[in-house]
Image: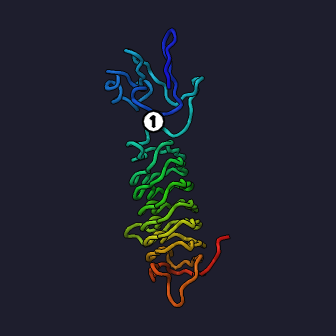
Amino acid sequence: MRVRQKKGVLRIRCAASGPLPGWKWSWLYNGDNKNATAAKYGLGSKDSYVGFDTKAFPVEWRVSPDGSPLTGTDMRAFTIQGKTLVKYSGKQNKVVVPDGIEKIGDEAFSGCQAERIELPDSVTAFGKGAFAYAGGLTEITIPKGVKTIPEECFRCCTGLQSIALPEGVEKIEKNAFKGYKDGEGISDMKLSSVRLPDSLKEIGEAAFYGCPIRDVLIPEGVTRMESWAFGMDERSVTLQVARNKPLFRLPDGWDTGWYTNARVKWNVKRP
């Protein structure tokens, strides 16, 4: 980005709420101005400056070229370290994670009440409990580069009704979508529709336990299934498996108690 000064006072308007991944301090601050204004950044438009030669000019954030305000995710609600989103502390119903972020850190959105979270295709990894207890979440799309849904990633996301894991996901870890809180025997989960990709190989302990899943197809490539992977109280579920069951036994690598109150259909083809 170039900043040019015409005769008179330089005026800079930015559609972003603050520096985005890939923006350098050399654009925002110049020389001694960097230390003087960096500590003030985020307090308001009057405290944000761009360095130009030996002068500093104010920057107006979240405005269009004609000066009208824009709406959207406030970048100041994000704590970002390198290419990792460490924490979101905002209170918006819709959150748009900036492009360039590659990892959503441990518990980054834990307890968040946003209804919708939009993730860029640049995201390839989630941390433990990244979206745990985000009770307001009803809509999220997992980027295609993600290979693992880590431990407790979506635990007790009580507003989430459906999830489609993209091709490329190979592992769902322990308690990833578990619906029970520690010490409580009641689940308020609404997650009843799940699409598991053909790339999936492992489903961890209690990964979906406590979710009222009515019907799910377990891909043929799943070689490991741990205990209590599916089931909920006394409610019945239907589990379809896209592989033949070996005579008188479960497939190698599958725990004998991988489901509760479920009816299992073997050798089911994906529609």
* Of the pair 25 and 181, the residue shown nearer to us: 25
Residue at image position (40%, 18%) is 56
User: Is residue 35 shown above or below 271?
Assistant: above
Where's the C terminus, which quadrant?
bottom right
Q: Residue at x 49, y 29 (%)?
A: 61
As drawn, the residue found furthest toward the right would be 271
Answer with the quarter of the image where residue 141 lies: bottom right
Front residue (pair 20, 231): 20
- Give how far across and how far down residue 42 sits, in percent: 40, 32
Q: Could you classify mark 1 by the number of other residues whose Cα lies within 10 Å: few (under 14), some (14-19), or many (20 or more)?
A: few
Residue 168: horizontal and vertical position, in percent?
Answer: 53, 60
Secondary structure under tag 1 reads loop
Report the number of discs.
Answer: 1
Decide: is 65 above or below 162. Answer: above
> Is the residue 98 above or below the residue 187 in the image?
above
What percent of the width, then of the height, locates residue 123?
A: 49, 50
- Rendering colour mode: rainbow
Q: Amino acid at mark 1?
A: Gly
Residue at 56 percent of width and 29 percent of height:
69
Question: In which quarter of the view is residue 27 placed?
Answer: top left
Q: Residue furthest top?
A: 7
- The residue at which mark 1 appears reads as 22
Residue at (41% x, 31% y) in the render = 24
Q: Nearer the viewer, residue 10 or 60?
A: 10
